[in-house]
Image (tube, rainbow, N blue to C red):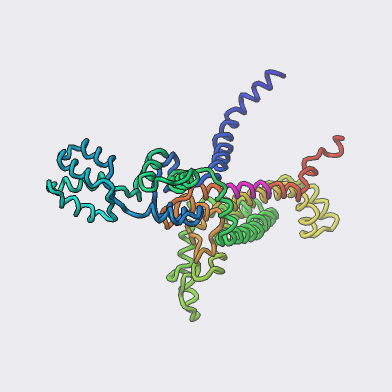
Amino acid sequence: MNSSKKLGLLLITPAAIVVVMLFLVPVVLTAVFAFTNMSTSTGISGGAYQISPNALQELRDHYDMPSVAERLSQSGFAVDEPGLAALGKAGIDADIVTELRGHIGETFAARRDAERAIRNLNHRPSLREVKQISDQFNRSIMNARYDSKAALLAAVASVMPNLSGAEHQAIIAASYTGWTWTTGNFRRMASIPGTQRSLVNTMVYVAFTLTLFNIGFAMVLAITTFYMPSRAAGFFRGVWLLPRISPPVIYVLLWKWLAWDTGFLSVFLGRFGIHSRNWMLDSGTNAWVFVVLINGFVGASMGMLIFSSALQAIPRPLLYASEVDGASRWQQIWHIIMPQLRWPILFVTCYQTLSLLTSFDLILLSTNGGPGGSTEVWALATYHTALNNYAGNLEYGYGAAMALVLVVVGVFLSLAYLRLFNYRDLVAKPLIEH
């Protein structure tokens, strides 16, 4: 017995490693990233400190420090001891440095004012030296990058020496360009209008595709072919497998050819005086019809196979006995076939719901969420946020938060389905074994 257990553990170890590496680890990392503000601008490693226009705006709005933001945004040049010391190290003529020492404390609002004063020195520095000297007296910290908090605070002190500790901390937080831990992704998700739109679109997409095709039409195909001769049934099942085995790009391209303003529908309907148009993208309603059809024909094939397999397992004597008792086809379906499909229906419902929640490739290829975001489902919005958007700033943290919501919704719906289908009754031992 012990050897059998060890052998079983040994055999299941590769599968367990695959599950951990390809499922659990990505889910855990998604949950971790969801609580960060990682993006293209922050990077995924540590960042520097920079007083940028965005940092100044955050100081004004979030920290209520408009006067500090105004002062930090100003350019300034000041003749001081640190600047004179730097000039000596840079090899500037000692006579020029000595003469500048007599101007300690003078400030200039712009570079041209400072350079004009430098050019008017008695020792007449060259043009190159004028640039070197003005650079050493530059006390503007706008858009300069600092590798550490200490370097940033030292630069801030040269401009505003009397700031409090709280103000220093606010400047550090506002100017940091790297990622930080935050729960702001979820607050943002709950506040922006696009969230509600994506949620409603996802509910429409999953509900219609699941009920009409992945379960409803799949069951019709399975039951219809069940009563056909085996050769005819095999042929029709093979036909309905074509959408699933076709490459997605070619499959969607065929639908686009059908819907283009120069495609089959426009040419055919043009014979009846209907103007040509792009039937897939001319309105939100038409776009949804095509999205459901494109995804439904693919999803129906899987349900058809599972339901057909389950139907083949029904004992034939049950059907023969019902026919002898005078049962019609509808009575056979309702009283014999449907009770036998509870397990397959539960599996197909759970699996296809999770698949529809997370899949977006066919929508991306057909409408890309259009027109006007009317078919932008949650998974596609997550992709656009984290991996491909028009603005160029990919928001990894916010995209991870959106993906985490999908994981939570998927778990919740799976548990709800188990409750709805009375999972405990399905796995209960037969009465004969009690």
The spot of residue 358 in percent (x, y) is 57, 50
Q: Is residue 268 above or below residue 48?
A: below
Residue at image location 56% in from the left, 58% down from the top: 377
The spot of residue 22 in percent (x, y) is 55, 37
Which of 373/146 is in front?
146
Q: Which range of residues does the magenta coloring cover?
A: 404-412
The spot of residue 195 in percent (x, y) is 57, 58
The spot of residue 19 in percent (x, y) is 58, 35
Which of 81/300 is in front?
81
Q: Which is the main secondary structure of the residues drawn in magenta? A: helix
Q: Is residue 278 left or right of residue 210?
A: left
The quarter of the rendered structure image containing the C terminus is: top right
> Which residue lies most toward the front here?
102
Is residue 367 visible in the rendered structure shown here? yes
- Total numbered circles: 0
Which of 56/134 is in front?
134
Q: Is residue 299 magenta?
A: no
The quarter of the rendered structure image containing the N terminus is: top right
Is residue 239 visible in the rendered structure shown here? no
Q: Is residue 259 above or below residue 38?
A: below
Which of 139/163 is in front?
163
Residue at image location 49% in from the left, 53% down from the top: 385
